[in-house]
Amino acid sequence: MAEDDLSAPLGQKKRKPPAKLPALVPKAIAGILLLSLVGAGLWAATVDDPLGGEPVAVVDTVSAQAGKSGEAGPGGGATARHDGNASGPRIAATETPQQPAGKTVNIIDGASGKTQQVVLPSPNDAKPAPPVDPKLLETTRHGAIPRIGPDGARPSTIYAQPLKATAKSDVPRIAIIVSGLGVSASATSDALTKLPSAVTLAFTPYGNDLERLVGSARGGHHEVLLQAPMEPFDYPDNDPGPQTLLTSLSADQNIDRLQWLMSRFQGYVGIATYMGARFTASEGALGPILRETGKRGLIFVDDGASPRSLSGQLAGAANVPFAKADIIIDSVPTAVDIERALGRLEAIARERGVAVGVSSASPAVIARLADWAKRIEARGVMLVPITAVAIKAKSS
C-alpha cells in the first residue's frame, strides 16, 4: 500500500495540489496593461481630437443674440458684448472630407443638438466680383479706405447697381436692407442664395473672410453697406464691439475708429448705423462722422431704430446722400407680423413714392422676403437698391 493511501482520510483520496503558474506570467500581464494605459494617456495628451477622428467641417456661426435694451442688433435680438471674433459655439458638420464644395451639409449645434442645413458655395460656381477701383482707395495706417477719385468719381456711384432699363420713374420704389451679415455662415449663405439682387446687404466689420463674402454679394449684383457700431444708451453693458464710435471720444478719435472700420473690406456704397441711440442723438459726436462719410464719397443710412436720431438733419446740412429706414420689418419676428410690416412698407411707398425697410438676417425673415419679392412687381411696386432712394446731396 502506498504511503499516500495510508495518510489519506478514510473513504477519500488525497487531492493533488493545483498547478502553479510560472512566476513571470502575472508580471508580464501587469506590464502589458501598464504599457497600454501609459500609451493611451500619451495619445490623449498629445492629440487634439475631441470627436475621436470623425471627419468634420467647422463652420463659423453666431451665438450672441442682439440685446434689446432699446436697440436691435444686426441679428435682430439683444446685443451682448462683441469681442471682434465669431463668438458662437464650434459647430461640427457631418461632411466627409471628400465631399465637394457646393453641397448641402448638416450643421449640428453641439450645445443644443439642433441641426440645420447649410449650402457651402463652390468657388467654381461663385460669380466674380466687380473689381474695386484702386483710384477710389486711400492708404491709411489701418489699411485702404474709400475716397473720392481724382476725377470726382464717388464710390457710392461707381459701386451702385443700375436700375432696370424698363424702370419707370413714377413707379413706387422700395429699398430693403438685410443687416448683420458676415458673422453667421448660415445667415450669409441664405442671403446670398435666396434674396434677389435688388436687396441691399449690410455687413458687420467683425466677420471672418469679409472680402470674399462681400465679393460674392457684389458678384450677385447686390449693393453693399458697411455697418458702423455706435454707442447705445446702456453702453458698456450693451457693447456693439471693438472700435465702437463713442460720445466720450474726440472727433479725431472717432474718425480714426471709423477709418479702421472702413478698412475691413471694400466695394460698399455707404455707411449704415449699428445701434447708436446715444451717439446719433449727439450733434457733436455724429456731425464729424457724417462729414467724413460725405468726404469719402459714401451715402449714410440710418436704420431707423432710434426716434432721437439727428442723422437726417445733419446729413442735409453736410450735403451727404442719406436714407432712413421707415419700417423695421422683423421688429416682431413672426410670419404674420413680417407680412404686416411689408404691407405697411408698400403703403408708405405708394404714398410718398419711396420707402425703406430694414431687417435682420434671420432664416424666417429671409424666407418671407424672398417670397414677397417675387410678387411685388405684380402689385405695381418696384424693389430697388438703396442708392436709388437715397436723398441726393445738394449741389454746392
Image (cartoon, rainbow, N blue to C red):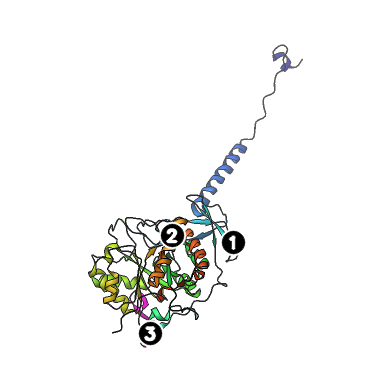
Question: Where residue 322 sits in the image (x, y, percent)?
Answer: 34, 74
Of mark 1 and mark 3, the one earlier in the sequence is 1
Q: Nearer the viewer, mark 2 or mark 3?
A: 2
Apparent side of residue 190 relative to residue 294 in the rendered image (left or right): right
Q: Which residue is mark 3?
A: 153
- Cα separation between marks 1 and 2: 45 Å
Question: Where residue 107 sits in the image (x, y, percent)?
Answer: 53, 56
Bounds of the magenta span?
136-151
- Cα separation between marks 1 and 3: 46 Å
The residue sitting at the bottom extreme is: 151
Q: Nearer the viewer, mark 1 or mark 2?
A: 2
Around disc 1, counting alpha carbons within 10 Å, would you say few (fewer than 14), some (14 to 19), or many (20 or more)? few
Of mark 2 and mark 3, the one earlier in the sequence is 3
Of mark 1 and mark 2, the one earlier in the sequence is 1
**Amino acid type, callout 3:** Ala
Q: Which residue is mark 2?
A: 340
Question: Where residue 340 sits in the image (x, y, percent)?
Answer: 44, 59
- Answer above or below: position of 388 versus 96: below
Any part of residue 166 in sight: yes
Question: Which image quarter holds the C terminus?
Answer: bottom left
**What residue is shown at x 59% (from left), y 43% (from top)?**
32
**Amino acid type, callout 2:** Arg
Q: Which residue is mark 1?
A: 97
Q: Secondary structure at mark 2?
A: helix
Residue 287 picture quarter:
bottom left
Question: Which image quarter holds the N terminus?
Answer: top right
